[in-house]
Amino acid sequence: MSAGIRPQARAYPAPADTGAPNPCALLPFPPDRLAVVAITRHGITLAGRVIAALPGAQMFAPQKYGAEARSAAPGAFTCYEGKVGAQVPALFAHFDGLIAIVSLGAVVRLIAPHLQDKENDPGVVVLDEAARWAIPVLSGHLGGANAIAAALQAAIGATPVLTTASDARGTLAVDLLGRELGWSLEASHDELVRASAAMVNDEAVALVQEAGRRDWWPSHANGRSGPLPANLHCFDRLEEIEPERFGAVLWIAQRALPAAYEARLAGKRVIYRPGVEQA
């Protein structure tokens, strides 16, 4: 991608209401924050299908296939000169999510030199040219790659290949709790790691909900079915729990953490803050 390229500002029609899931609604960010990279003729055709289902997304393709890109995604494509690897820094800088219709191994090599951390890296998903598999490669949770894969399933029928433990097992994703409801999260990196490990390793985890909507489970992390995980113990007030009994404590509340619990929860608490209107 040449210097100065930015996502194009365009107006997009609302998708028709067919009763099927709206793929755009599954994305964790607006579709115009999504880039679709294709490097072959067949890949460009598939990219056009993706963009038709996710209006607002932008296609990036080699200049030599400019005619194919224009035909597949009129008004929603950018062509670049040179190698695809040279486009990665700008793609990372200007988009929150990438769909790469490129081999998995090639994508790993292309993005590896540009990785920072899970809080800043975009969600990257590999889509095969037959549209069979949508494989989150980078930032499955915080970057939204798992959600992009779910959107691709709704859009073109590709099967998500989820390898994050919480999604593979359908358990609670600590770093995503309440995200679809706009809840904010207060925790250090180490606290998130500890709480996530406790959750997926079936340690006892306390979930204390004092505020916010209580119907979060069905839409959690692109949807959960069945009961809450057996190792999750629910409470209505922080004062009801003995923190020492739990590997982690997830606290959904508006109030400040009581001083008496600062030391007792040190290193193993994650706090979620619903919006005031949800209190």
Image (spheres, rainbow, N blue to C red):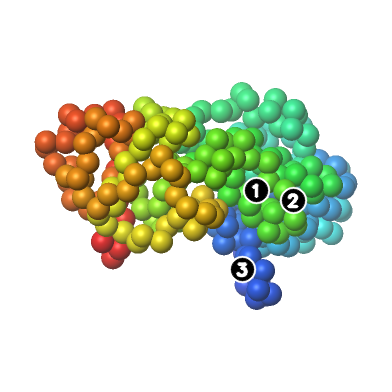
Name the residue type under label 2.
Answer: Ala
| Labels 3 and 2: the sequence-earlier one | 3
Indicate the position of residue 82 as horizontal and vertical percent values: 77, 33
Split into 4 quadrants, where in the image is the C terminus?
Answer: bottom left
Q: Is residue 73 left or right of residue 14?
A: right
User: Helix or strand or loop: what does disc 2 sit on?
Assistant: loop
Q: Position of residue 135 (x, y in %)?
A: 69, 40
Quote the CA–CA distance across marks 3 and 2. 27 Å
| Residue type at the position of mark 1 | Ala
Q: State which quadrant residue 3 falls in.
A: top right
Instruction: Judge the density around disc 3: few (<14), some (14-19), many (≥20) Cα neighbours within 10 Å.
Output: few
Residue 158, numbered circle: 2
- Horizontally, residue 255 falls left or right of residue 275, namely left
Residue at position x 64%, y 44% from top? 98
Q: Is residue 189 visible?
A: no
How far apart, in angstroms, are the residues tagged by discs 3 and 1?
Answer: 24 Å
Q: Are marks 1 and 2 in contact (CB under 8 Å)?
A: yes
Q: Quadrant of residue 37?
A: top right
Could you say whether the residue bearing mark 1 is in a helix, strand or loop? helix
Residue 234 shows up from this direction: yes
User: Which residue in the protein does label 3 denote?
Assistant: 11
Q: Earlier in the sequence, mark 3 or mark 1?
A: 3
Where in the figure is residue 204, as x and y percent of width and height? 36, 35
Mark 3 vs mark 2: give the one in front: 2
Residue at 38% in and 43% down: 232
Q: What's the distance in space between the residues labelled 1 and 2, CA to CA?
A: 8 Å
Compared to residue 31, the image places residue 65 above or below, namely above
The residue lying furthest to the front in this view is 230
Q: Could you tell me the amino acid type at mark 3?
A: Ala
Q: Secondary structure at mark 3?
A: loop
Per the image, the residue denoted by label 1 is 149
